[in-house]
Image (cartoon, grey):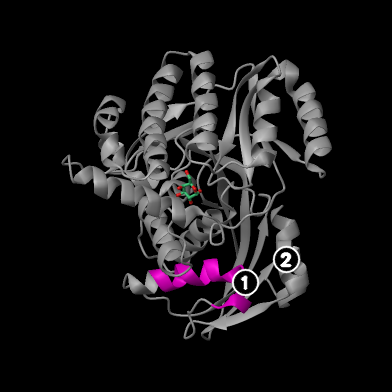
């Protein structure tokens, strides 16, 4: 891989002397969806697929970007003096946003660079190609300019750039999962205080399968920010009857006692999801500790039902993938993962039925939706690194 992308860098930018090569993973969330901006828990892991970059510093302020995933766009140019989001800057807005965020936080970025990217995560799939690119950019700046930023802070800077530069009000889960990733482990993260624990995922006898709906989505044009607003409205009304800082602080019992303070029926269901999903995530990690995979899978399935019926972020594509998976014996659990509205599902599947799964879910999906889904058997990998 390294040789291949350095070769491409030379083709595009003419010379790769003194270039450096880096990698940052994608992520999949096993359970704990739409809880991270509600002060709840999440349980994601980094993947061995992700984004590669070749970088070479320049002596001036220019920035030149190229992606092997968008070759038709060609080289996009900018400069350190022009760090503003621009539509024509396309995917490079994620990188520019991170450079901008570093400068906002007071770090010196003394010179520009040429950078070539190659992503092995399907774009817009819900496996966080954007957060992968953000953490990658942060990791590179930190390494090349020796800025001394911790990986946890790289996650926060990535989130800050996405919120403030790219206008997507995402939570901390994706950037954290990527920056703090650890091979064979999922991260049990409390988003209210960023305390976390690594939990070993022993993939003995089963695989993690990502089913990609190929329904494209971008967080910016999705209803993501709307869901966030609905939760904030619900919380504000709860606060008129109970002293509470986030929905994640509520137990299911407490929620049931005060839920009538939420005036809109829709917002009540949004808040219900946030509260119960947080509880499910805590229970799922407990089940895993007890080696109770069956329970873990049931909680994944419940998570999907809640995202489908109460949070309403699934849609016919994701529901078809998940509901078909549920019918297959040997599927431990299956649910949508990420923001929803398209993107991917994650399923835990016994080794012996992996082929059946791909065949059956693929066929039902194609027949019903009219185009193909893609399937990836994934592995849990480490956070960002220099290659
Ligand atoms: C996106 C956001 C995350 C999180 C998930 C939903 O991936 O970037 O912060 O909110 O959606 O769980």
Describe residue 360's horizontal placement relative to residue 271 as left or right.
right
Badge 1 density bin: few <14, some 14–19, many ≥20, Cα 10 Å: few
Residue bearing mark 1: 90
Q: Residue at x 68, y 50 (%)?
A: 122
Q: Residue at x 37, y 65 (%)?
A: 147
Mark 2 or mark 1: whose residue is earlier in sequence: 2
Q: Quadrant of residue 340?
A: top right
Relative to 314, say whether 222 is above or below. Answer: below
Residue 267: x %, y % from top left: 39, 44
Describe residue 356's horizontal placement relative to residue 336 as left or right.
right
CB atoms of marks 2 and 1 within 8 Å: yes
Give the secondary structure at mark 1.
loop
Relative to 3, say whether 301 is above or below. Answer: above
Relative to 204, say whether 322 is above or below. Answer: below
Q: Which mark is residue 171?
A: none
The alpha-carbon separation of the residues under discs 2 and 1 comes to 10 Å
Q: Which mark is residue 70?
A: 2
Residue 356: x %, y % from top left: 79, 22
Q: Which residues are magenta?
A: 86-101
Q: Residue at x 65, y 38 (%)?
A: 318
Residue 158: x %, y % from top left: 44, 59
């Amino acid at each position: 891989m390294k040789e291949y992308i350095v070769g491409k860098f030379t083709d595009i930018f003419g010379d790769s002397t003194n270039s450096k090569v880096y990698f940052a993973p994608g992520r999949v969330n096993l359970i704990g969806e739409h809880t991270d901006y509600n002060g709840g828990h999440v349980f994601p892991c980094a993947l061995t697929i992700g984004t590669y970059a070749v970088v070479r510093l320049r002596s001036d302020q220019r920035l030149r970007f190229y992606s092997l995933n968008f070759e038709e766009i060609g080289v996009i140019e900018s400069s350190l003096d022009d760090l503003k989001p621009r539509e024509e800057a396309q995917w490079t807005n994620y990188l520019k946003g991170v450079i901008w965020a570093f400068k906002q936080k007071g770090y010196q970025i003394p010179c520009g660079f040429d950078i070539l990217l190659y992503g092995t995560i399907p774009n817009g799939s819900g496996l966080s190609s954007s957060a992968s690119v953000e953490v990658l950019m942060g990791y590179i700046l930190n390494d090349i300019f020796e800025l001394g930023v911790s990986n946890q802070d790289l996650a926060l800077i990535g989130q800050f750039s996405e919120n403030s530069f790219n206008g997507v009000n995402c939570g901390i889960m994706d950037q954290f999962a990527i920056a703090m990733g650890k091979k064979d482990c999922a991260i049990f993260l409390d988003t209210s205080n960023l305390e976390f624990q690594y939990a070993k995922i022993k993939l003995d006898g089963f695989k993690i399968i990502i089913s990609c709906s190929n329904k494209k989505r971008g967080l910016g044009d999705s209803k993501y920010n709307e869901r966030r607003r609905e939760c904030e409205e619900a919380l504000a009304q709860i606060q008129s009857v109970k002293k509470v800082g986030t929905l994640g602080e509520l137990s299911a019992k407490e929620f049931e006692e005060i839920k009538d303070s939420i005036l809109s029926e829709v917002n009540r269901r949004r808040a219900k999801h946030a509260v119960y999903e947080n509880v499910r995530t805590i229970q799922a990690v407990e089940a895993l500790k007890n080696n109770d995979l069956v329970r873990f899978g049931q909680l994944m399935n419940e998570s999907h039902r809640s995202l489908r019926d109460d949070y309403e972020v699934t849609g016919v594509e994701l529901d078809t993938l998940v509901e078909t998976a549920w019918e297959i014996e040997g599927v431990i659990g299956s649910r949508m993962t990420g923001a929803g509205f398209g993107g991917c599902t994650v399923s835990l599947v016994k080794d012996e039925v992996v082929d059946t799964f791909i065949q059956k879910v693929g066929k039902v999906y194609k027949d019903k939706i009219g185009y193909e889904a893609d399937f990836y058997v994934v592995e849990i990998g480490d956070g960002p690194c220099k290659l």
